[in-house]
Image: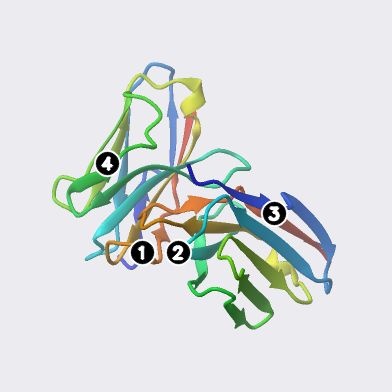
Amino acid sequence: GQQVMQIPQYQHVQEGEDFTTYCNSSTTLSNIQWYKQRPGGHPVFLIQLVKSGEVKKQKRLTFQFGEAKKNSSLHITATQTTDVGTYFCAGQGGGSYIPTFGRGTSLIVHP
Amino acid sequence: GAGVSQSPRYKVAKRGQDVALRCDPISGHVSLFWYQQALGQGPEFLTYFQNEAQLDKSGLPSDRFFAERPEGSVSTLKIQRTQQEDSAVYLCASSLASGTRNIQYFGAGTRLSVL
């Protein structure tokens, strides 16, 4: 079955440093979604990528979808304490309704 | 309400007890998903409904798990004879339409602890 690997599992940064999390799928995806889960909270939708090579930006967040539609990344520029949380990617492939979530990357920002 | 509502927020059960977890999706949302999230892990798919039809239950870990959505709105996840390994957060998510590429809106989850 489809597997989605996400690295790193944890990332500690000083406030102001950049952060990147990577997501890799074992199969070609039709789309990939990114979610953020604050400590004690629930996943909240951030963005969806559909096209090969697509790049989308939300303020300090940049999302990329690989040319082969098997990998994706989320980059945060100049992290802030409000960025703390776990970032999940979720990929869908083969016409499936069911997204497969990665394990998540927990971002810890030190002031 | 404006979002997905789950109840109870916390449930403590003795091993062997049956539990029922409720999900009230966003009004009008066709699709409903149940996930299990263990500590430090991503959400693991359990089952999927399109309206009242359970189209996929391949993620249910055993026949002790049962889900229903009889009128195509509220859904209940039932776990019979709970075991310690059932301890996790159970998340419900709904989306407006069926098919792929639909944004999922998650509830706050039910944290189940089996003693």
Q: Label 1: chain? A: B
Residue denoted by label 4: B76
| Kind of element beneath mark 1 | loop
> Cβ–Cβ below 8 Å for labels 1 and 3?
no
Answer with left or right where residue B71 lies relative to residue A9.
Answer: left
Q: Secondary structure at mark 2?
A: loop
Q: Is residue B101 left or right of residue A76?
A: left
Provide residue A37's location: percent of width, then percent of height. Answer: 57, 58
Mark nearest the camera among 2 and 3 is: 2
Residue at image location 51% in from the left, 64% down from the top: A32
The three-letter amino acid code for the residue at tag 4 is Thr
Is the same chain shared between marks 1 and 3?
A: no
* Residue hosting label 1: B3
Secondary structure under badge 3?
strand
Q: CA distance from mark 2 to mark 3?
A: 25 Å
Instruction: State how far apart marks 1 and 3 are (Cα).
Output: 25 Å
